[in-house]
Image (cartoon, rainbow, N blue to C red):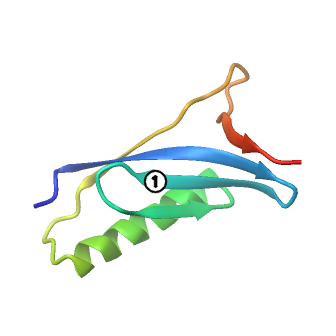
Amino acid sequence: MIDDILRFSMQRHDSENGTYYVINGLEIPLVTDGETIKKALHNLEEAVAAYCDDNALASSPRLEVSFEVDDSGTLEPLAVKS
């Protein structure tokens, strides 16, 4: 049975192709991403709904996403590639 709250972590990745955000499940095997935080969160909602359907779970849990913010107030990058 799934908990009422599913926890995820979000990281910002910078590459030569731009910035993207990756969300990883801490309690379930789920990874999704997006070019913006808003898109990554939207993709997370869709991925969790599909996970619940695939695993015959009746209710949709509350989603909790954590991330670290740097001194400038922006989401801190996890990896910087040149």
- Horizontal and vertical percent position of residue 37: 60, 51
Tell me which corner region of the image, top left, top right, bottom left or bottom right, holds residue 52. bottom left
- Is 2 above or below relative to 11? below
Residue 36 located left or right of residue 33? right
Q: Amino acid at mark 1?
A: Asn
Tell me which corner region of the image, top left, top right, bottom left or bottom right, holds residue 34. bottom right
| Element type at mark 1 | strand
- Horizontal and vertical percent position of residue 35: 69, 60
Which residue sits furthest top?
Answer: 71
- Horizontal and vertical percent position of residue 77: 69, 38
Quarter of the image where the N terminus is located? bottom left
- Which residue appears at 41% of the width and 70% of the height? 47
Residue 60 located left or right of residue 46? left
- Which residue appears at 84% of the width and 61% of the height? 17
- Horizontal and vertical percent position of residue 46: 41, 71
- Is 60 above or below relative to 38? below
Mark 1: few, some, or many residues within 10 Å (few <14, many ≥20)?
some
Q: Total of numbered circles in the picture?
A: 1
- Which residue appears at 16% of the width and 58% of the height? 2
Residue 57 located left or right of residue 28? left
- Is 1 above or below relative to 37? below
Tell me which corner region of the image, top left, top right, bottom left or bottom right, holds residue 66. top left
Residue under pointer 1: 24
Q: Looking at this view, is 75 or 31 the one in front?
A: 31
Residue 37 located left or right of residue 79? left
Which residue sits furthest left?
Answer: 1
- Is 55 above or below relative to 30? below
- Which residue appears at 59% of the width and 45% of the height? 11
